[in-house]
Amino acid sequence: MKKPATILIIIIMLFSSGYIKNTEDVNDSQPVIEKASQGTQATTNKGYLMKATIDGKLWQSTSMASVEASGRIVGYFNGQYIGLPYNKSYLVTGKKITIGQNEAADLFLKDGCSYTITKGQMEITKVADNWAEGSFNFTAVCSSSDKTVKITDGFFKIQILKN
């Protein structure tokens, strides 16, 4: 009877250590992303908006988190998201922010990869009334393979609260 229990414990340890990959990992994260995206604003061409080209394909968010609530610029589409750094001191037209170690961007795609953003840039292109706009691009590397994803032509528009 001890042998089956020992085997079960070893299998559990291998799954939890990541040595054995669970093919459901991407699907398991779906409820977390959906919960995180609750309380977001629907995107429109005249309001909140985030779009980018991911490896040559257009990606456009259908909702975005409030920067005041999340502390980040985050766009969601179909269980995927792009997250960018946010700080009120950035809100100066022409301000460039280097994305990397000190200013992190996030990328979650439904492809089973956990991405590390290696380099990129964000620029504030317009600040007016209670809205700010910017552009961004970055390169992301999958931690479990040599797959690289390029995010180009990124654009965002967010609402900001004036003090």
Image (tube, grey):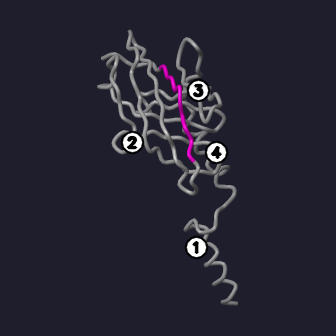
Main secondary structure along the magenta-highlighted residues: strand
Kindly state the secondary structure of the residue where label 1 is placed: helix
The tag earlier along the polypeptide, 2 or 4, is 4
- Left/right of residue 98 with respect to residue 146 in the rendered view: left
Label 3 close to label 2 by CB (< 8 Å): no
Circle 3 packing at 10 Å, graded few (<14), some (14-19), many (20+), is many
Cα gap from disc 3 to disc 4, whole angstroms: 16 Å
- List the residue tagged with mark 2: 100
The tag earlier along the polypeptide, 3 or 1, is 1
Q: Is residue 161 above or below residue 14?
A: above
Q: Which mark is residue 63?
A: 3
Q: Which residues are magenta?
A: 148-157
Label 2 close to label 4 by CB (< 8 Å): no
- List the residue tagged with mark 4: 30
Residue at the spot x=63%, y=68% of the render?
Answer: 20
Q: Which mark is residue 13?
A: 1
| Callout in the foreground (2, 4) | 2
Kindly state the secondary structure of the residue where label 3 is placed: strand
Cα gap from disc 1 to disc 2, whole angstroms: 33 Å
Circle 2 packing at 10 Å, graded few (<14), some (14-19), many (20+), is some
Kindly state the secondary structure of the residue where label 2 is placed: loop
Kindly state the secondary structure of the residue where label 4 is placed: helix
Residue at the spot x=38%, y=31% of the render?
Answer: 86
Circle 1 packing at 10 Å, graded few (<14), some (14-19), many (20+), is few
- Amino acid bearing label 1: Met
- Left/right of residue 156 with respect to residue 44 in the rendered view: left
The number of callouts visible is 4
